Image (cartoon, rainbow, N blue to C red):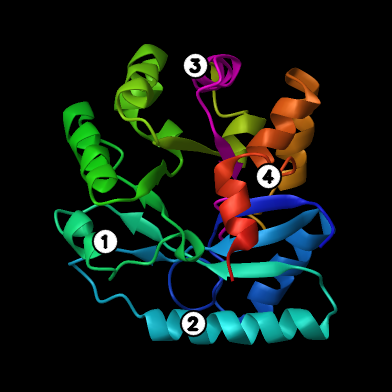
């Protein structure tokens, strides 16, 4: 496969959440990502363990439909199945029982929290996921005030909970949402606290992929190696290797 970006957070499956609403829209989103250099996408529909039934059969069906549509377009694009998990009290138990989708069946779990989550609650949740045998990837970590306001606290969490990864959205890296937001973004990136950048794409207009733009911005502001590491272009990190090996 031609080397390109890996996007681990993309609401690409149609009719399952607030992302794509039709197969045609999903195909257009996939094509937009492919044309901008993405070669692996993990489709991550929203799930809420223990609160709403997780329709894995529907996810798989929509995935196969989209894969077939992409194949007709002769896109060399791998689409894998995952989920964006909203953390609940049942998450760790259901993960341990194998009842919650991980990123392409790997040990990595994309997990999100309510924006106002307290630091101690977030810490305990991530600790629980690790104890269940999984590696948490904190989705759009910049949204949680308990982390975004304190790089030192975020750094301490990562040191104490080895294996936790932080994902930042491409739109945040590209900035323009206010001075303090941009300042915090630079601090996190400059101090190497961000492990992954991903699109969190939901559509083609308000929330598009922007993987290439984020890569170019990272390369311009920092260096090409850092940009490649965060976008999956390097293939060196263990997460990227696990996804390349996934089916």
Helix, strand or loop under label 3: helix
Screen quadrant of the C terminus: bottom right
Residue 56: image x %, image y %? Answer: 38, 79
3D distance between C-alphas at marks 4 and 3: 28 Å
- Mark 1 and mark 3 in contact? Answer it, CB < 8 Å: no
Q: Residues within 10 Å of mark 4 (few under 14, many from 20)?
A: many
3D distance between C-alphas at marks 2 and 3: 41 Å
Residue 14: image x %, image y %? Answer: 54, 77
Q: Is residue 45 above or below residue 150?
A: below
Mark 2 vs mark 1: which is more N-terminal? 2
Residue 64: image x %, image y %? Answer: 59, 85
Q: Which residue is mark 2?
A: 60
- Of tags 1 and 3, the one toward the viewer is 1
What label sits on residue 95 in the rendered view?
A: 1
Mark 2 vs mark 4: which is more N-terminal? 2
**Quadrant of residue 114 within the rendered picture:** top left
Is-magenta flag for residue 97? no
3D distance between C-alphas at marks 1 and 3: 36 Å
Is-magenta flag for residue 186? yes
Mark 1 vs mark 3: which is more N-terminal? 1
Horizontal side of residue 90 vs 160, given as left or right: left
């Amino acid at each position: 496969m031609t080397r390109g970006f890996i996007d681990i957070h993309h609401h690409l499956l149609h009719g399952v959440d607030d992302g794509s609403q039709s197969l045609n829209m999903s195909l257009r989103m996939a094509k937009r990502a492919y044309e901008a250099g993405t070669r692996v996408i993990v489709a991550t529909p929203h799930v809420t363990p223990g609160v709403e039934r997780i329709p894995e059969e529907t996810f798989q069906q929509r995935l196969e439909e989209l894969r077939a549509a992409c194949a007709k377009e002769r896109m060399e694009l791998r689409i894998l199945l995952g989920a964006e998990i909203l953390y609940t009290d049942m998450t760790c138990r259901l993960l341990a029982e194998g009842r919650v989708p991980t990123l392409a069946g790997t040990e990595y779990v994309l997990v999100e929290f309510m924006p106002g989550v307290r630091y101690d609650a977030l810490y305990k949740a991530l600790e629980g996921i690790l104890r269940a045998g999984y590696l948490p990837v904190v989705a759009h970590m910049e949204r949680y005030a308990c982390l975004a306001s304190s790089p030192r606290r975020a750094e301490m969490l990562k040191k104490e909970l080895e294996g936790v990864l932080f994902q930042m959205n491409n739109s945040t890296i590209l900035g323009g949402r206010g001075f303090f937001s941009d300042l915090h973004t630079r601090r996190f990136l400059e101090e190497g606290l961000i492990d992954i950048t991903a699109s969190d794409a939901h559509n083609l207009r308000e929330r598009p992929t922007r993987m290439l733009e984020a890569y170019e911005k990272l390369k311009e502001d920092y260096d090409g190696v850092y940009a490649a590491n965060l976008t999956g272009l390097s293939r060196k990190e263990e997460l990227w290797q696990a996804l390349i090996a996934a089916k």
